[in-house]
Amino acid sequence: MVSRPSLSEDAYVRSGAEQTAVKILVVGHFAVGKTTLIGSLSEITPLSTEEHMTSLSESVDDLKGVQGKTTTTVALDFGRLTLSERIVLYLFGSPGQQRFVNLWDDMARGALGALILVDPERLADSFEVMDLIETYGLDFAVAINAFDGGAEHTPEAVREALDLLPDTPVVTIDARDKKSSVNALITMVRYLQKRAALEHA
Ligand SMILES: Nc1nc2c(ncn2[C@@H]2O[C@H](COP(=O)(O)OP(=O)(O)OP(=O)(O)O)[C@@H](O)[C@H]2O)c(=O)[nH]1
Ligand SMILES: [Mg+2]
């Protein structure tokens, strides 16, 4: 397991007397909505490394359910969200497939935690990213990105399928909607703060 910073250590890059910058990963399997989420809530023009997919990628990334998708993120997404006067989140969208493990070495360094996006229709696709999260020892919350027309999946069903701990937050979002995406991050940060307080008690 890779060591990670605690709330009071290097996870914070001091950017001013009052403000604290926090690095957060937004992760999830192929086409789960990472780029969409960062795009909908970032207060700066998000950096995105989208490239057109070719037929070669069809054998690697499953387009079932997202046939309209023509691009994929080849490196990362980056955005910023000011949560309060004191906390600014720097969001790094990272692919959740094991073949990107080298990218994770850099991404996970200094990250306080991760928001894992899951599509309830493709839950098995999330196992790879859950393994990566475990490898890097990151605290996380889960956001169910409820694509239109998807069957109803309760947070409890997702919790059971992914074998999550009882206190891991699971929220339902629409990645295209700023308010619901911001709420997911607030829930995650509150959870991380609670954990940090327990660790330092
Ligand atoms: N209907 C619906 N479509 C969504 C939602 N979130 C994302 N999409 C669409 O789903 C597709 C995939 O979204 P992306 O944001 O590119 O997903 P990604 O996780 O960044 O994909 P990769 O970087 O290629 O792994 C895009 O066509 C989005 O417009 C949602 O909540 N509802
Ligand atoms: Mg993307």
Image (tube, helix red, strand yellow):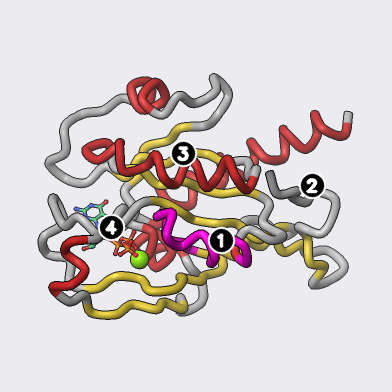
In the rendered image, the quadrant that contains the N terminus is: top right
SS type, badge 2: loop
Say what amino acid the circle numbered 2 marks: Ser
Q: Most prominent secondary structure in the magenta stretch? A: helix
Q: Could you say where residue 10 lies in the image, as x and y percent from the top left?
A: 81, 59
Q: Are marks 3 and 4 in contact (CB under 8 Å)?
A: no
Image quadrant where residue 156 sits = top left
Bin the neighbour count of mark 1 within 10 Å (Cα to Cα): few under 14, some 14-19, many 20 and up: some
Say what amino acid the circle numbered 3 marks: Val
Rendered image: mark on residue 6: 2
The Cα–Cα distance between marks 2 and 3, rounded to whole angstroms, is 20 Å
Between 34 and 2, which is closer to the camera in this rendering?
A: 2
Say what amino acid the circle numbered 4 marks: Ala
Q: Could you say where residue 177 lies in the image, as x and y percent from the top left?
A: 34, 55
What's the residue at 72%, 33% (across, down)? 194
Res. 171 in view = yes
Q: Nearer the viewer, mark 3 or mark 4?
A: 4
Q: Is residue 60 above or below residue 51?
A: above
What's the residue at 18%, 72% (across, down)? 56
The Cα–Cα distance between marks 1 and 4, rounded to whole angstroms, is 18 Å
Q: Which residue is mark 3?
A: 142
Say what amino acid the circle numbered 1 marks: Trp
- In the rendered structure, which segment of residues is drawn in magenta? 93-106
The Cα–Cα distance between marks 4 and 2, rounded to whole angstroms, is 30 Å
Asked whether residue 100 is drawn in magenta, I would say yes
Q: Which residue is mark 4?
A: 31
